[in-house]
Image (cartoon, rainbow, N blue to C red):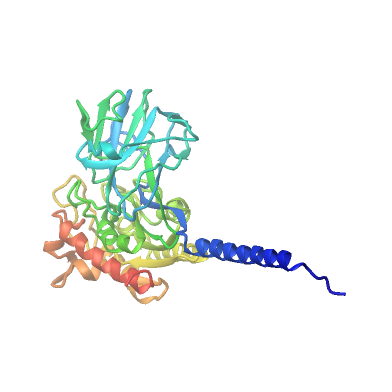
Amino acid sequence: MPISFPQALRQRWLRTCAAVVVGTAAISAFATEAPMTHWLPTWTASEQPIWEAGELPLPTGVPARLDRQTLRQLARVSVGGTRARLVLSNRYGREPVTIGAARLALSAGRDGIDASTDRAATFGGSPSITIPAGAAVTSDAIELAVPPLSEIAISLHLPKPFRPGGFHWDGRQTAWLSPGDATRNATLSHATSFSGRLLVAAIEVEAGNNAGAVVAIGDSITEGNGSTVDANRRWPDGLAERLAPRGIAVLNAGISGGQLLRAGMGESALARYERDVLAQRGIRAVIVAIGINDIGWPGSTFAPHTPLPQAAAMIHGYRELIRRAHQRGIRAIGATITPFAGALAGTPIRGYDAPPQKEALRQAVNAWIRDSGEFDAVADFDAAIRDPARPQAMLPRYDSGDHLHPGDVGYRRMAEVAAAAVAEVGMAD
């Protein structure tokens, strides 16, 4: 027998149902339209162990000891975001490091900051933290809107004496030291400078859910050696200028002296690939731009007793990087090895481009990168900057002057080539 309701009760019940339906629809629409965000690295610096005096024919360029000072470093990000996080690393440290205060702000040039944007970083709610040797930490979210391609100043107070065990050698960016806790200061008084990077491993931003990243893993040519210091003219910088407006971060995982197969001025690409590439959030593609030091170092001042590798060994190494990227759904772009005839002539480094077998090896490896079809796309840096009249050498207008590293113009050309390769794998127009 059907149940009958009084008319007034029935109308009230229908109004309640309608309100529930409208409310549910509104909540659903809000959930659909509300912008989704996630934490995405927008800048990174690959860490490497500090070498002992005499271990390599190059100075480290960083202080051997920091004593109750403020360290201010600059980093130009790629994509922007609504909030930021700071990643600090003591991975190669031999002792704990205490951070008394950490602050982020937009840079005002040199050692200056825009004081209106100055924000404190905290770690589990605390303004200070001690990072054990071998560890890394990520800050709490920092309420700082980060514009795309902006330059961020990171100020760290080190209240206790500290001997760095790890660093980033060739940052192409001036870092500043000032006595005491000057983290809030708009400019630093009595500041001294150096050229490497310490402790700062990454900056993350809260970016739109569709934002992703490309990592460039390489050596000093990816690092930007030969480009103008403090000018952000490395080829990954030029790539970021093209991709960041489209929500694609560009992360520079270059280490000067880096090699594919062996440790050099840092771990091999095979050894650091997981940490510096695959473990990063939001990675959609990797550009593999490494191998020149595998060829140039053996028999040179850097590694006088190291034999030249076989092409098959280098190809096996590239295949391993491709395989590991594809396992994670990451596209792999191969970059050809640039010409280096006459490299480092007139410097204390001897034998980088000799004997002739090195050029034959470079050509064999480049032929495989171009023609094997195993990479998802190819950035043919060799073809872009070589001298057509002398293909084993760089075109003079692209050369920084040492015949190994491009200058600003050469890196700009390489950025164009890299952007085309990224577009080929479907990440940019």
The residue closer to the viewer here, 334 or 358, is 334
The residue closer to the viewer here, 301 or 134, is 134
Judge whether 42 appears above or below 356 on screen: above
Residue 389 appears left or right of 149: left
> In the rendering, at what x and y percent does residue 291 appear?
33, 59
Query: Which residue appears at 19% of the width and 52% of the height?
Result: 227
Residue 198 appears left or right of 36: left
Residue 146 in view, yes or no = yes
Give the residue furthest to the right: 1
Query: Which residue appears at 43% of the width and 35% of the height?
Result: 122
> In the rendering, at what x and y percent does residue 83 appear?
39, 47
> In the rendering, at what x and y percent does residue 278 appear?
46, 56
Query: Which residue appears at 41% of the width and 39% of the height?
Result: 88
> In the rendering, at what x and y percent does residue 231 appear?
19, 49
Judge whether 423 appears above or below 349 on screen: below
Judge whether 172 appears above or below 308 on screen: above
- Total marks drawn? 0
Residue 197 in view, yes or no = no
Which quarter of the figure is the C terminus placed in? Answer: bottom left
Which quarter of the figure is the N terminus placed in? Answer: bottom right
